[in-house]
Amino acid sequence: MAAHFDRRLRKAAVTTTVAAVAVAALSASQAPDVTADGNGRQTTSDNVPTSDTPAADSATGNSPYYTDLPPLNSPSPAPTTGTPTSPGSSEAGIPATVLDAYKKAESELRRAKPGCNLPWQLLAAIGKVESGQARGGRVDANGTTIGRIIGPQLDGNGFALIKDTDNGVYDGNSSYDNAVGPMQFIPSTWAWAGRDGNGDGKEDPNNVYDAALAAGHYLCRYDWDLSVQADLNRAILSYNNSQDYLNTVLSWLEHYRKGTHEIPDGTGSLPVGRSDDPNTGASPTPGRTGANPGSRAPSTPSPSTPPASEKPTKPGSPSTKPPTDPAPPTETPAPTPTPTPTPTDTVHHLENAGTRGLTATAGDTFAKRISTRAETKAGDAVGKVRIRFTVLGDTDATFTGGEKVAAVTTNASGVAVAPALVGGEQTGAFTVRATVVGRTVPGLDYKATVTERVADTLTSTGTKELTCTPGGEFADQVEVKATLKGAVADKVAVTATLIKSDADPVENDKGPYFKDADGKAVRTLTGRQTDAEGLLRLPKLYADDTEGTYILRLTTPGGATLDITLKVAEPAEPTPAPSTDPSTAPSAQPSTEPTA
């Protein structure tokens, strides 16, 4: 059924014998998608959708959505004529696998972005509006939809204009993008928002676990708190910038918050009304076909009533004029209108808008932010263009908020400023690439480097002289504290080396030593870092049989150096105590002095 259904999407109509069945499935298959690319983190003032926000800046391209509303669950409806029946129990039911995906996504977002306060009922409300809960829960045991859910082609004909970004990999369309999956992501958005929600190592927009988690991250990509109504509204409007869409989602959110229950997969109800359908909210009639709602069939005159000039004469009456076939009207085909170029269409290349020297210490925020300017072939600035910034390479650096991809709209000067970069603990160089969303032009690469944490001072916390007998072990361990400009320097790498002398600072081959895991002598230690208090305690030191005075030198990135003296010597001979034996005491000698 699913395969046949997907093929129907490409036809203008289906036979009326299957219309009533196809309409519900067709509606579910053409749910709107997440748009051109979604948004990266920006300042709060940039995050509020406005009436003139380009369609491609919303999550769905402001494409059609399902307008079915939850039933009015009156506790005690008055027994009067016209009281609506409430299918509340069935409408509140969510297919088991789909419900599990929403709840798992909420749990993961509570851990990853606790300040967002994402409720799973919001994912359920959006999933209802976007695809009717994955077409009533038609998913397999792993959460993948049975048959792809593909939205209408976003070719600018009644929808946003979003040209192909994935060579048709996800949507099967190499000309334009289409919405894909139960949460309706377009490929360009999925490229950065995609997540692996079921732990199978893949990010599949057709999998309800992956799509639900991706939708959660999309809604939480700004510093919004969804427990605050204003922020909740902003998040929903960022998915589709329509007040009616907001009201519809909020209605389902409230409905699901009142209580839901689990139903078997594949038994959920299918939506029938779409926002671009003139019969929105009406039940499908046998006369409706499965035509793509994105296209409109040309109207034809009704044959039931002929024009007055062609009324037939009474039977048997002679005709005043011999019947003649009227000349067929001459039809001049209407010229195909040339689409007005969008700002994105006019972009010829990207230019560096003055970003230089991207360097930060591990764990720190880069002082400079990446700026990119979109220009025409003539070098003119292009505003209102989406620029995607992507962190590439072997690095754990991210943009603020922990994302590796962010998309920003160029201002009137054609400049897009990426969110701040934050260095990870992994040091080294990496690349940030800027590309134009929805247009194939060469990307612009920025080189960035994360350097080691540094300290400018090392001090010993011990006061005792460190001594040891030959072949023994030192009683006290070496402990030092690292600081930078007087402040604690945490996670600073410290190298400890037993050197020969100040004049010859190479590793010694005798005297004190550390032990490795196998008990072998080691005289240089690397990979040790100070803790949160800037402290580092070295392993126990041992001595070989060579007596002498030795130097343990500690160094850090940033130039801090500390020498600690170690002595290896035999213990001093004990001094004998004075004797108390009277027999050994010197005898008294008689005086030779004459007496008085």
Image (cartoon, rainbow, N blue to C red):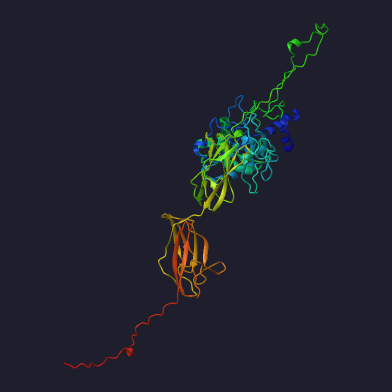
Q: Which quadrant holds residue 574?
A: bottom left
Residue 54 location in percent, x, y? 57, 32
Residue at 79% from the left image edge and 8% from the top image edge: 313
Is 134 left, or right, of 351 in this rendering?
right
Query: Seen from this angle, which residue lies furthest right?
Result: 316
Taking 354 as reference, is 155 above or below it? above
Residue 351 location in percent, x, y? 56, 40
Q: Which of 289 and 69 is in front in this view?
A: 289
Query: Seen from this angle, which residue lies furthest front?
Result: 378
Q: Nearer the viewer, residue 78 or 427?
A: 427
Residue 414 location in percent, x, y? 54, 35
Q: Where does the C terminus fall, quadrant-wise?
A: bottom left
Q: Which quadrant holds residue 62?
A: top right
Q: Where does the N terminus fall, quadrant-wise?
A: top right
Q: Which quadrant holds residue 376?
A: top right
Residue 173 location in percent, x, y? 69, 37
Residue 111 can be seen in this image: no
